[in-house]
Amino acid sequence: MSRDSTSAAAHDFDAAIALASIGDNETQGQTHPAYGNMVGPFGGIIAATLLNAVMRHPDLLGEPVSQTVHFAAPIADGGFTVRTRVMRTNRTTQHWHVELIQNGEVAAFATAVTAVRRETWATLDASFPKVPPAGSIAPAPHIARAAWTGRYEMRFIDGAPGAPDTPSDSSQSTMWIRDTPERPLDYLSLAALCDAFYPRIFVRRPKWVPIGTVALTTFFHADAQQLAAQGSAPLLGVARAQRFGNGFFDQSAEMWNERGELLATSHQVVYFKE
């Protein structure tokens, strides 16, 4: 499902990722205050917007399999242009390149792969965590300085950001999460949800420092039928880092449904400054 500026967008998410055609392979978008971050927009909403440019393209083949977003420069609040092109189309796969442009310069760009999925042998090496049901855990308060956190219902099982200057022995967080207000899951909202974890440095060492995602890769394991079956039920998200140092850290995440199906995984590298 794609979103454009002419559709009746009842949810702020749909308004935030909406794009209007302005020419061949060019669309125009606008940042949305509901998905603002401490500086500029929430990275997940940018990932969803760039994926939306692919999903609404008339030459689209299949469903999203992967997307990698590079955040090349700070994105300012306001309007932007998105340029989308098909790099190659094969029999069942398609490769895309998407650029977000502000003030005549590329602020972010993405590559994506879409494909026609087919039935094959399947198995799962990852393990679904043993966790309490979402309804048994109270939602966490959002962070006022980051408006986007108010657009997600987060119910932490472990790894909630701690008190300032109280280090944790682990960077892992496990939480039930969904859009708020509730919204049926699709590839666009899943792309944003994969980035809806507090930066791991704020869990491992709760201290506010300047940070910014440099690159975010998301792998979509679910097909459209699985997403449609999910509706607006919460997902179980698990995120962790492997290493911090030299001004960067990594962050990996898993997104599961309540039935123990792995819907997506993501990996990103994040810049931080002391």
Image (tube, helix red, strand yellow):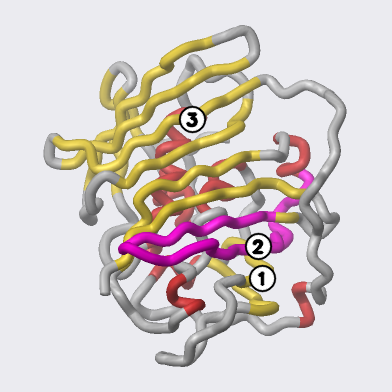
Q: Label 1 neighbourhood size at 10 Å, few (<14), some (14-19), many (20+)?
A: many
User: Foreground residue, 220 or 46?
Assistant: 220
Up-down relation of residue 103 to residue 176 (above or below): above
Q: Amino acid at mark 1?
A: Thr
Could you tell me the amino acid type at mark 2? Answer: Gly
Circle 1 sits on which residue? 174
Residue 167 image position (x, y, % from top left):
49, 87
Badge 3: residue crowd in 10 Å (few <14, some 14–19, many ≥20): many
Q: Residue at x 54, y 84 (%)?
A: 168
**Among numbered discs 1 and 2, the one appearing first in the sequence:** 1
Q: Is residue 193 above or below residue 79?
A: below
Residue at numbered disc 3: 112
Say left or right for 257 vs 122: left
Q: Is residue 33 visible?
A: no
Q: What residue is shown at x 33% (from left), y 80% (from top)?
A: 208
Q: Quadrant of residue 116?
A: top right
Sequence-wise first label, 2 or 3: 3
Q: Nearer the viewer, residue 244 or 16?
A: 244
Question: What amino acid type is highlighted by mark number 3?
Answer: Ala
Q: Residue 203's x, y, as percent?
A: 50, 77
Quadrant showing the N terminus: top right
Secondary structure beneath disc 1? strand
Under circle 3, the secondary element is strand
Give coordinates of residue 103: x percent, y percent. 12, 40
How far apart marks 1 and 3 lie (CA) works out to 27 Å
Q: Is residue 66 left or right of residue 50?
A: right
Q: CA distance from mark 1 to mark 2?
A: 6 Å
Q: Give the answer, above or below, for where 61 lies relative to 239.
A: above
Instruction: Give how far across and how far down residue 232 sits, in percent.
Output: 69, 57
The magenta span reads: 229-255
